[in-house]
């Protein structure tokens, strides 16, 4: 049998691999994906979706002042017209942070797997070798000093450890009445949610990290959360990497507690800080704020400071 020759010019071109979409491209095309889910609906279903969308709630013949107020409100709304509307973020916001956290977690797991295969040991928990010194250490929550913050060393233990908020004046009244003689504890144990591992973690509270931690950066690595005052001078004397809001809240969980109705500092709005509001009178709401704080705190530690969580392998 003769082998047939193939003209090189007749060879089919090789298929090029598809380029992976960036986070920005995913977000830019999100509306297109959502809108496609409406295709193929009956005329009646389309009318229902239209009525339930933001356009369906427009109010005609508004005064200029009323129109401005409606615009301010609708900017914070998300249309609920269809099952895909949850994918539409409010104006001026997007899911970029969620994508960044996902990508960061996946990258850490991949890198850990490569290191483990080279060294013959498993690093599937995503831990960085640079942070191994944190294993067995107590994570730190830094509390602000002063008389005005809702949470200080006077009442931080009761809130973080016992899910109960005691106002400063009530704590001082208990002291005067002799019902609280010992100084507030600076450590407490927190039981982790099952999704983030088993067991408990002992946390440490402090409001003078510069004096307690000094310039030992391995000790500063134990800081997992900073309760912010909303003013940059709070951490101006801290070491490099912790003394400005951008770096600080990139490596620690930034939170801000305020009482309901309090004015939020303008400077705080520019930082990566999560806000929590405490009710002035309804103490039953304390546990709701407490649960929200710990849910976010544990999720942060699972990504950024995994070494400070129990090893359940």
Image: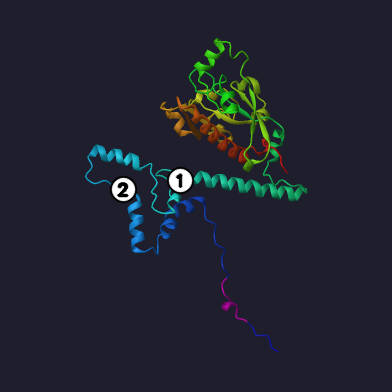
Reply above or below: 93 against 43: above
The secondary structure making up most of the magenta span is loop
Residue that numbered label 1 is attached to: 94
Reply above or below: 102 against 248: below
The answer to whether residue 82 of the structure is visible from this angle is yes
| Residue at the image point whose x is 47% and y is 51% from the top | 27
Q: Earlier in the sequence, mark 2 or mark 1?
A: 2
> At which x and y percent is residue 106?
61, 48
- The image quarter containing residue 195 is top right
Residue that numbered label 2 is attached to: 57
Q: Point out the stretch of residues depicted in magenta.
A: 6-13
In the image, residue 11 lies in the stretch drawn in magenta = yes
> At which x and y percent is residue 155?
56, 21
Q: Is residue 269 left or right of residue 196?
A: left
* Residue count near mark 2 (Cα–Cα under 10 Å), binned few <14, some 14–19, many ≥20: few
- The image quarter containing residue 123 is top right
> Given the current orientation, which residue lies at the most extreme right position?
120
| Quarter occupied by the N terminus | bottom right
Kind of element beneath mark 2: helix
| Residue at the image point whose x is 42% and y is 29% from the top | 266
Q: Nearer the viewer, residue 227 or 251?
A: 227
């Amino acid at each position: 049998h003769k082998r047939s020759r193939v003209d090189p010019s007749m060879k089919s071109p090789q298929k090029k691999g598809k380029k992976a979409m960036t986070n920005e491209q995913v977000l830019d095309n999100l509306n297109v994906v959502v809108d496609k889910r409406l295709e193929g609906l009956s005329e009646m279903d389309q009318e229902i979706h239209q009525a339930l969308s933001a356009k369906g709630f427009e109010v005609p013949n508004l005064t200029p002042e009323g129109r401005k107020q409606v615009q301010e409100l609708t900017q914070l709304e998300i249309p609920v017209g269809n099952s895909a509307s949850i994918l539409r973020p409010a104006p001026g916001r997007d899911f970029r942070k969620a994508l960044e956290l996902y990508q960061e977690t996946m990258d850490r797991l991949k890198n850990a797997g490569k290191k483990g295969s080279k060294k013959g040991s498993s690093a599937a928990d995503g831990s960085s070798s640079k942070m191994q010194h944190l294993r067995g250490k107590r994570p730190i929550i830094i509390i602000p000093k002063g008389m005005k913050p809702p949470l200080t060393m006077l009442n931080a233990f009761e809130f973080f450890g016992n899910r109960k908020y005691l106002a400063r004046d009530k704590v001082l009244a208990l002291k005067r009445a002799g019902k609280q003689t010992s100084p507030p504890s600076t450590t407490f144990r927190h039981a982790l949610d099952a999704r983030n591992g088993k067991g408990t973690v002992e946390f440490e509270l402090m409001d003078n990290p510069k004096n307690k931690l000094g310039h030992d950066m391995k000790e500063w690595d134990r800081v997992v959360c900073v309760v912010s005052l909303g003013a940059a001078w709070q951490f101006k004397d801290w070491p490099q990497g912790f003394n400005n809001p951008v770096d600080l809240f990139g490596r620690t969980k930034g939170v801000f507690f305020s009482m309901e109705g309090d004015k939020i500092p303008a400077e705080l709005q520019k930082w990566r800080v999560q806000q929590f509001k405490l009710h002035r009178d309804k103490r039953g709401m304390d546990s709701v704020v407490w649960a929200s704080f710990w849910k976010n705190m544990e999720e942060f530690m699972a990504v950024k400071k995994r070494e400070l969580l129990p090893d359940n392998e």
